[in-house]
Amino acid sequence: MNTIYRLLLTFNATSLLMLIFLVQKGYSIGHFFPKCPYLVGTPNYLSYLAYLSVPVLLTGLSIILSSLLGKDDFQPDEISSIDHANNSFLPSYLGYFFVALSVGNWETLWFVYGVLFVFTFLSQALYFNPLFLLFGFEFYNITTKNGTSIFLISRYKYKKPSEVDVPLANRINNYTFIERGGNGSRFGEG
């Protein structure tokens, strides 16, 4: 199950490259289904919304499926530092958009996407997907007192190591965890 889940996360994290390519080239849904007259006349903006809905829905599915992964917990006395990671990964992720804008044809797109997908999957370090932000998740780099670095995806808004009290986190890999919990902060701020 873990490998299938990681494949889904990798697709979710890299699929916006294809979406940007489709938008940049102006491909509507009718382009792919020329024999369906009601799709041929679909306005581009509706096609683009439909394209965007696929990775958004699959990201939602990955959040639901995360409950099937292994379980872990983190106590406040185990954490030595915590850093908010949302902004540190966004510039790297924006690189995908610039790559997609420079891709000229389908053959190049599939090659570039394939290489990106394989390296993202094999890196197994982080599964940063900005679509998680739409679902209210935050990204954190956490260091435990024994020096282990962990990437935590959580709906809670942590600011200090003493606030990190995670009774249930699902293990994506040895360094990446998702805490599905509730929305907002446990500490009085939303």
Image (spheres, rainbow, N blue to C red):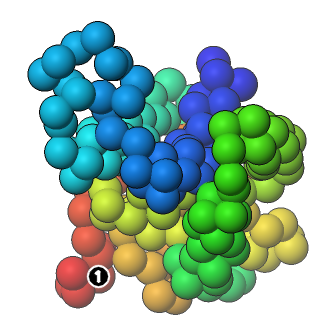
Please identify the quarter of the rendering in which residue 46 is found: top left
Q: Is residue 24 left or right of residue 124?
A: left
Question: Which is more toward the observer, 137 or 169?
Answer: 137
Q: Can residue 53 be seen from the camera position used here? A: no
Q: Is residue 64 left or right of residue 24?
A: left
Image position, residue 94 (x, y; %): 60, 73
Could you tell me which secondary element the residue under label 1 belongs to? loop
Point 64% across, 70% down: residue: 98
Q: Is residue 176 left or right of residue 168?
A: right
Q: Can residue 125 be seen from the camera position used here? A: yes
Q: Is residue 91 left or right of residue 43?
A: right
Count of number-bearing discs: 1
Question: Which is more toward the observer, 51 or 87?
Answer: 51
Q: Amino acid at mark 1?
A: Phe
Image position, residue 137 (x, y; %): 39, 63
Image position, residue 10 (x, y; %): 65, 41
Question: Where does label 1 land, which residue?
Answer: 187
Point 13% across, 22% down: residue: 38
Please identify the quarter of the rendering in which residue 171 is found: top right
Q: Is residue 159 above or below residue 6?
A: below
Q: Is residue 79 above or below residue 123?
A: below
Point 29% across, 75% down: residue: 185
Give the quarter of the figure containing the C terminus: bottom left
